[in-house]
């Protein structure tokens, strides 16, 4: 029991430590205050590379917007939404910069509502639920397997609770899986500028169709040490582009 | 006659005046910030006639005699002079330990009433290390003075503590006409003790017992960098010369001291407020829930020690839509001690909020130079979000801005808070390893449960085997006892019962359930065909012997042997 408690405590301390404000973020704020957007963009960019967070991505978006680098701003705001998908300001700004990129393009949230709900609970809650339900299931399984013929009230309750505990475990397990996948997998791409070339195949023939700079491309797969990426456009066309020509998140 | 009447009138007036005075009890402590061993003078004044009571802390050591007397002073009340007559008691002492001590109140208890004075806190700090020239080089003089200073080199803005110390090889009776040392340059000086307050002690220097006293402790804040000298202090002492009848006077002039004031190192931080010492900042907003257009109060307090009285007002940058409303109010609460100017400086800024919604002010930052670590330090205080309720009414300037925003919308501003949420995945719980880790308690429970189950079954089997062996042993023992019985009918009955009991225990049923039908239902695994046939045969023989007339010993013994064989045939 002590070991379980210490494990939970350890996990949460890791989670909370990851929330502490870093020095780059503070430096970036100072530069924003001085309206030195160039320096602030650089600082927040380094910050997101070092310790990505909602606040760093969001402020990177604001700094990029201040420099009128709308593609980078869109990437930053939508990356911020990856960390806090329900934030209204980030959604507003993402829509705002999308309009700047392409007035005709109708911005939608990158993540479906179900995923937003799952992410809204946060990885820590899912982790807590999965650990608790796993330990609870372990106790129930132990009781049931070690005493199969016992007709005690406790055993009856153990059998009754086995189902709900399993359901909670599976849901939270999915929550952990979905959250981890969400944060580790790159799913979308944004073109860095209007002239980004797209190809039919890696190093192959260049595609004639242009991609709307305000659109969000879905990443299908990466190729050759991630130097090439296959994306699906709004018109469901499968295109290849160099990773360096796209902002991915 | 006329003279007598006049004197009576004068006494009458004086007594009326004295009677008309308000009763008071006053406690005066000087100084209130002292070092260990530093002299503290306590004066009690009262015009009440009664028993005087004052409890002093255990750490306070009274030194010297108590002076008592009567005095009077003139006060101006409503433009009129008023003579105040009172009794006073004065005594000195010092503290032995560091701490803050409560002194007072002084009680004067009369028959009808108890009068109390104010109470004061005295802060006692460690004795400051002072530097001085070597006193042993002056032992050729009868009396000599040396200037002591807290540091040889100080940074610009750093306080310097200077004190005079007199060494005497003769007995000093009195100190007169003290003229303080002077700093040879632009500086602000604050006297830490009264010049007439000295505390005497004895020190052994080069084997000689010298009487010493410290005088004129002063705090100096040099205003410019450079090399400066501290000009000597001088005083007249009255000492006891054994060769003469009356005490002698001697003028003592001290040495001169030097001090270097260095500039602050390069790399001044952005939020530097010319503060040198150790400081902290705290800030809060008095009213965080307001209507648009209202004024909030931002209270900022800088506390610490150093050159607190000379620091600059911190610069606060406001976000758009907020503006300062007049100048800030500044309240100082500063006292001077050997640590420099100590206490706090409070600023109250009035800020008009002309925008609605959640408004987040930037953290308030100040930077200071710490001479101990020789580093610049930046400290900050975060402010909570202001919740501004929209009233729909905008300031004229803001209206134009709002109109402009309608035509050309802008992004939401940057955020200063490090918002939680969106926690990054923990590597430990990702991939198959993570899945295994999360499922491991369940697997552990399953394996442990199965192990416990196998262990329990094994224990049960062992117990059953032991019981079977025990039944077998019991039955065989009972059969052996049966051989000694002479009554063959009884032996036959008992033989039948022993067999039934054995079989009942073997099959874990009651004795009554052992019938031929029951035995027939047993599977070959439980009861072999051969054994079954033997059991049926022995029961048939028992019945035949029992009901067949005379029972011979040999028949019974034969049956007992058969029964033994059957019992032994069970594992």
Image: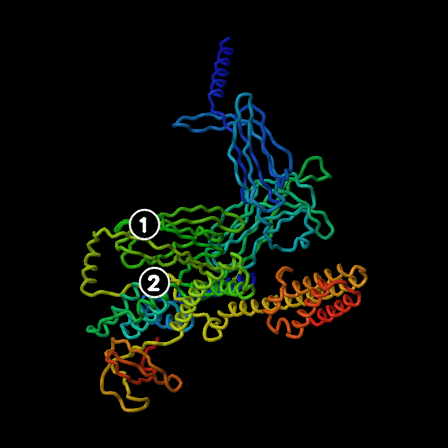
Labels 1 & 2 near each other (Cβ < 8 A): no
Label annotation for residue B379: none
Please say whether residue A122 is visible from this viewpoint. yes
Q: Would you identify the image quadrant in which residue B526 lies? A: bottom right
Q: Is residue B201 shown left or right of residue A124?
A: right
Please say whether residue B34 is visible from this viewpoint. no
Residue situated in front as seen by the camera: A193 or B271: A193
Q: Is residue B465 shown left or right of residue B193?
A: right
Q: Secondary structure at mark 1?
A: strand
Q: Residue at x 48, y 14 (%)?
A: B9
Vertical side of B341 occupied by B371: above or below: below
Residue situated in front as seen by the camera: B89 or B224: B89
Residue B551 image position (x, y, % from top left): 77, 63
Residue B132 image position (x, y, % from top left): 61, 54
**What residue occupies the far top of the structure in this picture?**
B1
Q: In the rendered image, which residue does mark 1 sit on?
A: B289
Residue situated in front as seen by the camera: B200 or B296: B296
Q: In the rendered image, which residue does mark 2 sit on?
A: B415
**What residue occupies the far front of the structure in this picture?**
B549
Q: Using the image, name the chain to which the residue with label 2 belongs.
A: B
Q: Is residue B264 shown left or right of residue A202?
A: right
Disc 1 crowd rating (10 Å Cα; few below 14, some 14-19, many 20+) is: some
Q: Residue at x 40, y 52 (%)?
A: B283
Q: Residue at x 46, y 70 (%)?
A: B426
């Amino acid at each position: 029991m002590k070991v379980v408690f210490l494990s939970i405590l350890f996990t949460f301390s890791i989670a909370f430590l990851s929330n502490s404000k870093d020095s780059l973020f503070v430096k970036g704020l100072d530069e924003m205050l001085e309206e030195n957007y160039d320096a602030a963009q650089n600082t927040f960019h380094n910050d997101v590379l070092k310790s990505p967070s909602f606040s760093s991505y969001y402020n990177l978006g604001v700094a990029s917007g201040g420099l009128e680098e709308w593609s980078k701003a869109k990437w930053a705001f939508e990356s911020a939404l990856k960390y806090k998908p329900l934030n209204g300001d980030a959604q507003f700004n993402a829509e705002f910069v999308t309009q700047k990129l392409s007035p005709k393009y109708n911005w939608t949230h990158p993540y479906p509502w179900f995923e937003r709900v799952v992410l809204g609970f946060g990885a820590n809650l899912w982790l807590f639920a999965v650990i608790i339900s796993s330990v609870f299931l372990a106790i129930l399984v132990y009781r049931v397997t070690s005493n199969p013929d016992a007709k005690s009230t406790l055993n009856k309750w153990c059998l009754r609770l086995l189902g709900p505990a399993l359901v909670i475990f599976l849901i939270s397990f999915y929550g952990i899986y979905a959250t981890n996948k969400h944060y580790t997998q790159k799913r979308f791409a944004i073109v860095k500028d209007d002239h980004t070339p797209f190809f039919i195949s890696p190093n192959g023939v260049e595609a004639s169709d242009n991609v709307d700079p305000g659109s969000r491309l879905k990443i299908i797969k990466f190729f050759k040490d991630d130097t090439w990426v296959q994306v699906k456009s709004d018109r469901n066309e499968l295109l290849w582009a160099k990773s360096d020509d796209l902002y991915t998140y | 006659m006329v003279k007598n009447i006049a004197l009576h009138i004068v006494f009458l007036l004086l007594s009326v005046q004295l009677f008309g005075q308000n009763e008071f009890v006053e406690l005066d402590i000087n100084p209130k910030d002292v070092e260990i061993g530093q002299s503290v003078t306590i004066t009690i004044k009262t015009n009440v006639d009664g028993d005087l009571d004052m409890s002093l802390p255990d750490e306070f050591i009274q030194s010297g005699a108590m002076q008592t007397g009567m005095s009077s002073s003139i006060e101006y009340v409503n433009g009129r002079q008023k003579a105040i007559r009172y009794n006073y008691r004065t005594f000195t002492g010092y503290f032995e330990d560091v701490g803050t001590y409560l002194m007072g109140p002084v009680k004067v208890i009369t028959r009808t009433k108890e009068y109390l004075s104010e109470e004061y806190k005295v802060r006692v700090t460690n004795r400051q290390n002072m530097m001085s020239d070597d006193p042993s080089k002056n032992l050729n003089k009868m009396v000599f003075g040396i200037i002591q200073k807290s540091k040889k080199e100080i940074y610009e803005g750093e306080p310097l503590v200077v004190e005079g110390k007199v060494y005497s090889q003769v007995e000093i009776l009195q100190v007169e006409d003290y003229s303080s040392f002077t700093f040879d340059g632009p500086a602000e000086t604050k006297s830490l003790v009264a010049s007439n307050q000295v505390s005497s002690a004895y020190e052994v220097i080069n084997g000689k017992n010298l009487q010493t006293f410290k005088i004129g402790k002063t705090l100096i804040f040099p205003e410019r960098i450079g090399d400066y000298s501290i000009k000597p202090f001088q005083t007249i002492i009255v000492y006891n010369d054994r060769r003469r009848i009356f005490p002698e006077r001697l003028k003592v002039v001290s040495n001169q001291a030097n001090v270097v004031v260095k500039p602050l190192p390069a790399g001044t931080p952005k939020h530097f407020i010319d503060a040198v010492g150790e400081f902290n900042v705290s800030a809060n907003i008095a009213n965080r829930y307001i209507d648009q257009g209202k004024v909030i109060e931002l209270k900022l307090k800088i506390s610490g020690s150093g050159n607190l009285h000379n620091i600059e007002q911190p610069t606060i940058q406001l976000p758009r839509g907020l503006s300062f409303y007049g100048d800030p109010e500044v309240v100082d609460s500063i006292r001077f001690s050997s640590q420099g100017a100590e206490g706090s400086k409070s600023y109250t800024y009035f800020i008009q909020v002309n925008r609605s919604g959640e408004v987040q002010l930037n953290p308030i930052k100040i930077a200071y130079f710490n001479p101990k670590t020789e580093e610049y330090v930046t400290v900050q205080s975060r402010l909570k979000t202001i919740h501004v309720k929209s009233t729909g009414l905008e300031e004229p300037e803001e209206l134009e801005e709002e109109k402009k925003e309608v035509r050309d919308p802008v992004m939401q501003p940057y955020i200063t808070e490090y918002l939680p949420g969106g926690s990054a995945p923990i590597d430990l719980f990702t991939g198959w390893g993570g899945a295994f880790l999360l499922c491991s308690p369940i697997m552990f429970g399953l394996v442990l449960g199965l192990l416990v189950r196998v262990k329990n079954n094994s224990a049960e089997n062992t117990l059953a085997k032991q019981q079977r062996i025990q039944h077998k042993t019991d039955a065989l023992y009972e059969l052996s006892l049966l051989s000694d019985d002479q009554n063959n009918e009884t032996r036959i009955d008992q033989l039948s019962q022993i067999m039934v009991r054995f079989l009942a225990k073997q099959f874990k049923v009651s004795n009554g359930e052992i019938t031929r039908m029951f035995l027939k239902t047993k599977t070959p695994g439980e009861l072999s065909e051969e054994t079954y046939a033997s059991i049926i045969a022995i029961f048939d023989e028992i019945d035949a012997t029992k009901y067949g007339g005379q029972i011979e010993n040999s028949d019974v013994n034969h049956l007992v042997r058969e029964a033994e064989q059957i019992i032994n045939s069970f594992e």
